[in-house]
Image: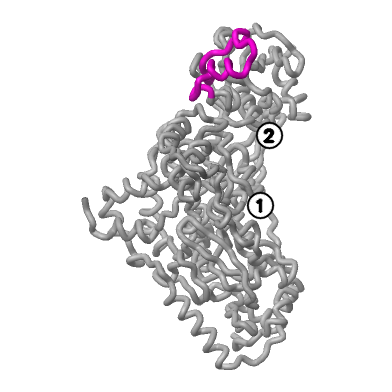
Amino acid sequence: MAAAKPRLAVHKFSSCDGCQLAFLNLGEDLLRLAELVEIVHFAEAGPVAPEAAVDIAFVEGSISTPEDEERIQAVRRNSRHLISIGACATAGGLQALRNLADGPGWSAEIYAQPETIHSLATSTPIAAHVPVDLELWGCPVNGRQVLGAVRALLFGVVPALEKDKVCLECKRHQAVCVLVAKGLPCMGPVTLTGCGALCPRFGRDCYACYGPAENPNATALGRRLEGLGLVPEAVARRFLFINNGAPAFAEAGRHWREQRILTPICAEDVPTEDRPDI
Amino acid sequence: MAAPGFLPRPYLQHLLAALTAAGYLCLGPKVRDGAIVYEELGSADDLPRGVHDHQQPGAYRLHRDESPRCFSWANGPQALKPLLFAPREILWTSAAGSDGGITFHPEIPEALPTAVIGVRACDLAALRLQDQHFLEGPSPDPHYGVRRRNLFLVAVHCTHPAATCFCASTGDGPRAESGFDLALAELDEGFVVTAGSPKGEALLGQLPLEALDPVQQATADGEIVAAAQAQQRALPSRNLRDGLFANLHHPRWDDVAQRCLSCTNCTSVCPTCFCHAEMEEPALDGLSSTHYRQWDSCFTEGHSAIHGIVIRADTRLRYRQWLTHKLGSWHDQYGRSGCVGCGRCIAWCPAGIDITAEATAVCGGDHA
């Protein structure tokens, strides 16, 4: 009889479920994973045992409701290694934009019976509530990231995370820089790779879905984006998007919002005359 | 060596045909995604006829006119480096044996004989430095070596420096002096063709060349001289080693760190930068693993991380490392500066930082 397999759970909090597809889209590797570990809780895939004690817990989603706040404490107690996955779990997600606004006010305006909505005033990352052993950033995370983490833990070593910026990965792929050659407001210079520089390789500007890289110079990039023709509010929106809750982006977003000028110019805002002829 | 000859423009395809017949895959400049990049040429019609570049710090644009010329531009983002020092490649694989041991399998790539058309003097100078680094040390790199041995180089003397170019000040261009198999000087009506190696001479013999008119040669030479004179940037000296190391605490390092994105674009487009990282990608079952080498940069955290300590945690130290190595300690390591004046790090820096301005400011004796 072989030794008991490590037990794995995938928990969902406030999120779109997209990061769980990193597992569901694995194909044959999902079968291989099921041979290596016992998947005891993964509601989207079938097994449901939310209270089970596990060796590895992947946590998708942000803490957005009072119920989330309580449940994450239980997940932490029941998990040897807790790994938060995706922009919601690591930075609060797109829904953290409400942290910058009057969330209850919005609810009151949108819902007929806002008293039935039980949301916290903020959406916050898992690490703001419980100790997290590893964060996998991305919107969504991919199979390589989650399998890499599982494999390393099965070996008994600390998972090695990609820390490079999108620009370096972009150059490794020999993509032509869309900021320099097209004047697009690319976020690559401040963004963590992991995506394989997917957007610039297809000619569009990175929108920072993997969050801030280490040592990001958001101030300098913001100035450059302004130089490309973006008004301050548009610069702010580049930072205040999927990973708006990440401190480096939140701070840059606040800074550029404060520079806001009253202007009739609509701000989507790459000047067309700066496009290349070819 | 055979005397130079003249290849009329309509016969340019003969050059590609001769190279193809000799077994070479032909790579050359093409327009892709708004830039000139080196990719496989189907025919001479793929060359960027009438295409010109406009380069400034942090900006690169192409435009087209009716010129018959195919090489009226300064370098795009890459040339030879990615063809020889692959951005990512497998060094070895390993597998767990049934006896509990591990077996290792080296992965030496197969390299097709490859001809690159349109190589500029700055890139030939960079190639010499990369050869020194990868092949002439105590442990020649087999991956670089197999590709290098299969390379046939058709240089084109540069007549259109960009505003970012400064090869005249580093002594590396715009004329391709050596290190090529064939060199072309482009005129409206055709090309002055010169052989630079026995391989090149053999190929030259297969081309439908006409006798070279001294006026054509003089016109070609004049354009190259004018290209040197037209350059707008310069490094203050070919050896800045002492000036840089005497100014390690110059306030300019703090100033540039405010502007620098630490994004690694400069080192990635630099034709002489050779830093790499290695990484292991185990299979999910844990029974085999693949060991990769990929481009790294002195602007990453990993580049100076040892045992949990990051030696160069901030941009000031990373930029200083790059500049003091490139323009300083390269002299100790390779007998010359690591900069060939191609200007790519200026044009492709999203923040538009100018290495010539930074080096001048740091070495200019302007102590705080």
Q: Is residue B167 magenta?
A: no
Rendering coords of residue B5 (x, y %): 63, 87
**Residues rendered magenta in the picture:** A98-125
Q: Are marks 2 and 1 on the same chain?
A: yes
The chain under label 1 reads: B
Where A75 sits versus B115, above or below? above
Secondary structure state at the residue bearing disc 1 = loop
Q: Say which quadrant the N terminus of chain A sits in.
A: top right
Q: Residue at x 63, y 22 (%)?
A: A154
> Residue B290's mark?
none
Q: Residues within 10 Å of mark 2 (few under 14, many from 20)?
A: some
| Amino acid type assigned to the residue bearing label 1 in the image | Ile
Density class for disc 1 (Cα within 10 Å; few <14, some 14-19, many ≥20) is some
> Residue A64 location, x and y as percent?
57, 16
Closer to the camera in the image, B147 or A212 = A212
Determine which quarter of the picture holds residue A158.
Answer: top right
Instruction: Read off the chain for label 2.
Output: B
Residue B328 drawn at (x, y percent) = 35, 57
The residue tagged 1 is: B108
- Give the total of numbered labels: 2
Q: Is residue B238 above or below residue A258?
A: below
| Amino acid type at image mark 2 | Ser
Residue depicted at x 62% and y 38%: A195
Q: Secondary structure at mark 2?
A: strand
> Residue, x 35% and y 56% (percent of image)?
B358
Residue B40 point in image, percent of width and height: 70, 63
